C-alpha cells in the first residue's frame, strides 16, 4: 500500500464528510439521504472523468475500499457534527488539499489514457470539482463553481503547470508536489483576499 493510495482514501473520506455536512444543513434528512450526498460528493468527479474517458470499471466499483472510506466519512460527520461545524477553516484546508490531490491524479490518469494534454487538464479539474458541483445542485445551493472566489481556475492552473513541467522532463514526484502546491496557494489566497476573475459582462 503506497502513500498516494492512502491519501486518495483519506481525500475521498473528507469529501464524504463535506457532503454529509452540506446535506444536513439544508433539511433534516435521514441516513440514506446524507450517505447518498456524501457518496456523490466523494466519487462524482472521478466517476464523470472515468466515464468520459471510457475507463472501466469505475474506481469505486473496482476497489471497495473507497466505499468504506465514504461510509467512514459519513459516520464521522454524524458523530462529530457539532465540532466539525465549528471547524470551518480546518475543513476548508482539507477540502483544498483534496482538490489539489485529485486534480493532479485526474490529469495523470487522463494522460495515461492517451488524450490531448488540454483534455487531460480538464479531466483533472472535473475529478476535483464535479462531485462538489453535483452536491450543491442536489442540496439546492449555488454550485461552488459559480462562487466569486477562484476555485476551478486554481485546479486548471495546477493541471497546466503539471503538464508544462512534465513536458520539460521534471520527475513525477517533485512535479506532483509543485503543481499541487500551486493549487493550494492559489485557492487559499483567493479566499483570503477574495480574489476572482473578471466578470463576464457588467450590466
Image (tube, helix red, strand yellow):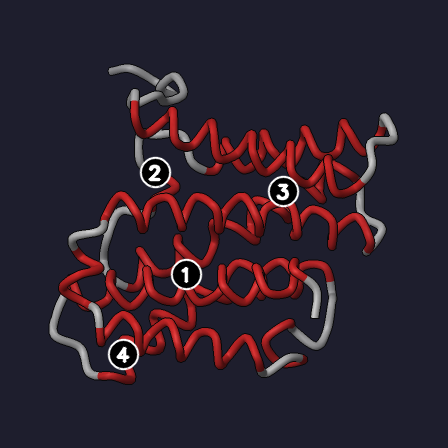
Residue at 67%, 59% in the rendered image: 52
Location of residue 92 (image quadrant): top left
Query: What secondary structure is marked by label 2?
Result: helix
Give residue 165's position: percent from left, percent from top: 77, 28
Question: Rounded to the nearest whole Å, what is the CA distance between mark 1 and mark 3?
Answer: 20 Å
Question: Rounded to the nearest whole Å, what is the CA distance between mark 3 and mark 4?
Answer: 30 Å
Q: Earlier in the sequence, mark 1 or mark 3?
A: 1
Q: Earlier in the sequence, mark 4 or mark 1?
A: 1
Mark on residue 146?
2
Query: What secondary structure is marked by label 4?
Result: helix
Question: Rounded to the nearest whole Å, what is the CA distance between mark 4 and mark 2?
Answer: 25 Å
Question: Rounded to the nearest whole Å, what is the CA distance between mark 2 and mark 3?
Answer: 17 Å
- Rate crowding at label 3 as few (under 14), some (14 to 19) or many (20 or more) other CA atoms within 10 Å: many
Location of residue 138 (image quadrant): bottom left
Residue under label 3, please give it.
122
Question: Rounded to the nearest whole Å, what is the CA distance between mark 2 and mark 1?
Answer: 19 Å
Question: Rounded to the nearest whole Å, what is the CA distance between mark 4 and mark 1?
Answer: 16 Å
Q: Is residue 157 left or right of residue 108?
A: left
Give residue 66's position: percent from left, percent from top: 54, 75
Give residue 22's position: percent from left, percent from top: 24, 61
- Rate crowding at label 1 as few (under 14), some (14 to 19) or many (20 or more) other CA atoms within 10 Å: many
- Which dot, 4 or 1, sits closer to the camera? 1
Query: What secondary structure is marked by label 1?
Result: helix
Q: Earlier in the sequence, mark 3 or mark 4?
A: 4
- Rate crowding at label 2 as few (under 14), some (14 to 19) or many (20 or more) other CA atoms within 10 Å: few
Look at the picture and state if 136 lies above or below 71.
above
Are the residues at dot 4 and dot 1 in contact (C-beta closer than 8 Å)? no
Residue under label 4, please give it.
33
Quadrant placement of the N terminus: bottom right
Residue under label 1, please give it.
15
Quadrant placement of the C terminus: top left
Amino acid at each position: 500500500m503506497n502513500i498516494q493510495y492512502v491519501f486518495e482514501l483519506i481525500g475521498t473520506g473528507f469529501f464524504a464528510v463535506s457532503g454529509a455536512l452540506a446535506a444536513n444543513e439544508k433539511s433534516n434528512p435521514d441516513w440514506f439521504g446524507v450517505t447518498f450526498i456524501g457518496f456523490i460528493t466523494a466519487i462524482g468527479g472521478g466517476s464523470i472523468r472515468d466515464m468520459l474517458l471510457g475507463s472501466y470499471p469505475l474506481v469505486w466499483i473496482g476497489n471497495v475500499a473507497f466505499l468504506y472510506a465514504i461510509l467512514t466519512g459519513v459516520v464521522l460527520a454524524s458523530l462529530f457534527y457539532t465540532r466539525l461545524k465549528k471547524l470551518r477553516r480546518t475543513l476548508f484546508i482539507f477540502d483544498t488539499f483534496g482538490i489539489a490531490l485529485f486534480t493532479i491524479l485526474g490529469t495523470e490518469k487522463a494522460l495515461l489514457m492517451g488524450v490531448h494534454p488540454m483534455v487531460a487538464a480538464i479531466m483533472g479539474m472535473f475529478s476535483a470539482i464535479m462531485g462538489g458541483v453535483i452536491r450543491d445542485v442536489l442540496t439546492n445551493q449555488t454550485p461552488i463553481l459559480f462562487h466569486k472566489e477562484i476555485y476551478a481556475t486554481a485546479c486548471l492552473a495546477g493541471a497546466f503547470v503539471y503538464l508544462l513541467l512534465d513536458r520539460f522532463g521534471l520527475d513525477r514526484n517533485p512535479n506532483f508536489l509543485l503543481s499541487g502546491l500551486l493549487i493550494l496557494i492559489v485557492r487559499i489566497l483567493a479566499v483570503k483576499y477574495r480574489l476572482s476573475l473578471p466578470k463576464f459582462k457588467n450590466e
